[in-house]
Amino acid sequence: MNFDPTILDLTDQINEGQFEYFEPFLKEIKEINIKDFNFDIFKKYIEELNPDEFEHLWSKDLEDLMHFIDENYLIVDIEEFEKSDIDVKQIMFIEYIEFLMNVLPYKVVFAKYIKKPFKNLTELENWLDNKNISNDLALLLEEDITIINNMYNLIKSTISTSRKAVEYMQRAEKLKSYIEYESNFRDYFIGIVEDTDNEMLKHLILKYYESEFGA
């Protein structure tokens, strides 16, 4: 008997094996392999998922991943994810992974917090033992918000003296929306860092350092 494709539309069925390409990314996140993790490609793959595909992947792998992160590295507001609509959850997930695997290690920890070389992980661990890591990282993130807002105010002030002030001010308003978006997420992650135990943050920083520079 010949198969009639009109009887059953298989395009609506989610193939369990179709998300195998995510597995290396999930492994890198769990291991905090920031050196090999390509966030831009990961973000592209997540954004390309339709709502049904993302929800399926969330139930299959991503929810467990977030629980793993919450238990080992950085507090996750699981309840906030669970009550969010799919599209919001998708954006939140992307932002969270960017913070964990890119923003926190490269723009905060390595750029501003660890400013001197360490001979090994033990030396770094001893240095971290004397730090209030949660408070320190929160303050550095707050500095970022201040810098972003000051940048906007400077641009706006410069524009107001321009001959094309009206035209440029419209562009500045678009920039303001972006800055507010970034500031809101920075505020969100300040709360995440403040709620995370110092020992967990120390463990996370050691994983960052080991991935980037070796043991």
Image: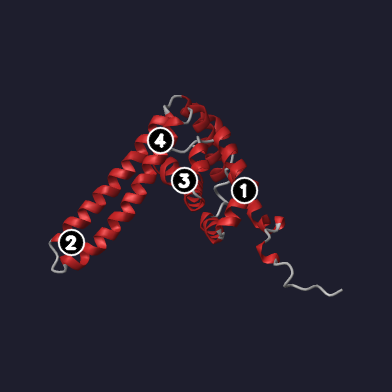
Residue carrying label 3: 99
The residue at the point 50 percent across, 42 percent down is 83
> Dot 2: what SS?
helix
Q: Could you classify mark 1 by the number of other residues whose Cα lies within 10 Å: few (under 14), some (14-19), or many (20 or more)?
A: some
Element type at mark 1: helix
- The reply, left or right, for residue 118 in relation to residue 57 is left
Q: How many residues crowd mark 2 within 10 Å: few (<14), some (14–19), many (20+)?
A: some
Q: Earlier in the sequence, mark 2 or mark 1?
A: 1
In the rendered image, the vertical position of residue 51 relative to residue 97, given as above or below = below
Q: Residue at x 36, y 49 (%)?
A: 182
Mark found first going from the N terminus, 4 or 1? 1
Q: Is residue 119 visible?
A: no
Cα gap from disc 2 to disc 4, whole angstroms: 34 Å
* Residue 166: quarter of image: bottom left
The kind of residue tagged 4 is: Gly
Q: Amino acid at mark 2?
A: Ile
Label 2: which residue? 159
Amino acid type for the residue under numbered disc 3: Phe
Name the spot of residue 15 as percent of width and height, x first. Answer: 70, 58
